[in-house]
Each structure stands twice: as structure tokens, then as C-alpha cells.
Amino acid sequence: AAFPVSLKSYLKFKAQMSSTTPDVALESDDLTAEQSLAWGDAAFVNEQYEEALTNYTAALAVVAEKDVLTRFRVHSHRTAVLYKLARYVEAYQDAVSANGLLQEKAVSGLRPGETEMCLRREGLAAFQLSKFAEALTAFQKAAQLASLNKRSSDYSYSDWTERCEKRLKPSPPPAPAAATKPAPQQPVVPSAP
């Protein structure tokens, strides 16, 4: 479900309200990481990618260090918006950060498929950056999770792994040019005087 207004509109409305009723004012700093994440998700669904990015970044600024689950989600969701904005380097960095959080600590509360989705995002961003080995690893891990969770995915990991493997195979060296033999020379016969 999308929110009916954007975060900017909401904050503008609250700022206008603060001039008449100061106790109603809400600053963007007052939003929790979860609220900023929700606003970012709403903006993303509405294809307002720049606004989604702003909200995800705001969520990262206020999320508690020990709240690994929320940090994972924010990084993962921000990966998606950065990918949509064709900012592949940052998308890849966020995906690696998100997946790194899961490797550092045991995280409970993950939704089914969340880790798989983040690995897929890492693979897609890595592929765009021509990091085919990293993309292949991410796609293989995502496929393994989908299989372990007995999730039939409409996403074809085998296609992506094949694409990565194809690009990782060294190109065969160019065939040497066929040696051309010079045409046999006719013996020079002296002409008669």
C-alpha cells in the first residue's frame, strides 16, 4: 500500500501547521528509521526514486547500530533504488554492506526471500559493473537460498549464471593468420641474343 503523500509534502504540511499549532510540528529528525524506511518504500512503489533514496539515506542516519535487521533492510532497499537510478557502484556497495551484515551477526526476523532478494540485487549491480565473478557468486547463493526454501522463483538464476560464466571464459586466442606461401617463382631463363 502506497502512502497518499510524499515525505516532502508531509513535512511541508507539518511545517505549515507549526506556524499555527507549534506542538503539531514534526521535523524529519523526529522520524524513526522504520518510518523513514516506510516512506522510502512508498516513494519507491510510486516510482519517486530520488525521494526514496532520500528517505532510505535518512533512515541509515538514524538507525541504531545494534538494529541489524533494520540496517540490513535499509541497505537492501536502497540498493534497489540506486539500481533503478543506474548508480551501480553505490548499489553494489549497499548490497555488499547489507549481505555483510548478515554474515557478521545472526539476524532474526527476516522475511522469507529477503536475503535471496538482496543477493540478487548484488548480482545485478555487480554484473552492470562487469564484476562477473562477484555477480556469479551472488546469483549462485541466491539460487541456493531459493532452492533451500523451496521457493519457486519466477526469476531465472540459471540465465544469469550462464551470462556470468560466458563472460568469465577467456576468449580463445585469435587464430594465427594463415601463412601464405609466396608463389613459386619461375626460373629466369635468359633470353636468346
Image (tube, helix red, strand yellow):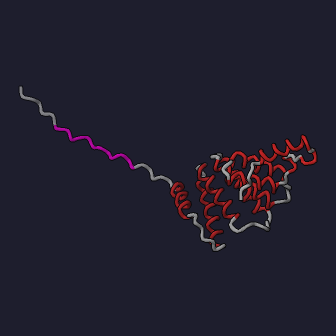
Q: Position of residue 51 (x, y in %)?
A: 72, 46
The residue drawn where x is 75% and y is 62% is: 103
Q: Main secondary structure of the magenta part?
A: loop
Q: Position of residue 178 (x, y in %)?
A: 33, 47
The residue drawn where x is 81% and y is 57% is: 34
Q: Position of residue 70 (x, y in %)?
A: 79, 59
The quadrant the N terminus occupies is bottom right
Task: From this view, report whether residue 179 is shown above or below residue 159.
Answer: above
Is residue 171 within the magenta segment?
no
Choose between 145 and 10: the one closer to the eye: 10
Residue sticking out furthest to the right: 23
Choose between 171 and 153: the one closer to the eye: 153
Task: From this view, report whether residue 39 is shown above or below residue 181.
Answer: below
Is residue 178 within the magenta segment?
yes
The residue drawn where x is 68% and y is 48% is: 49
Choose between 75 and 161: the one closer to the eye: 75
Residue sticking out furthest to the top: 193
Choose between 189 and 180: the one closer to the eye: 180
Report which quarter residue 118 is drawn in.
bottom right
Answer with left or right where residue 117 lies relative to residue 170. Answer: right
Q: Position of residue 163 (x, y in %)?
A: 53, 57
Q: Which residues are magenta?
A: 175-186
The residue drawn where x is 54% and y is 64% is: 158
Task: From this view, report whether residue 22 is shown above or below residue 76.
Answer: above
Answer with left or right where residue 114 lies relative to residue 65. Answer: left
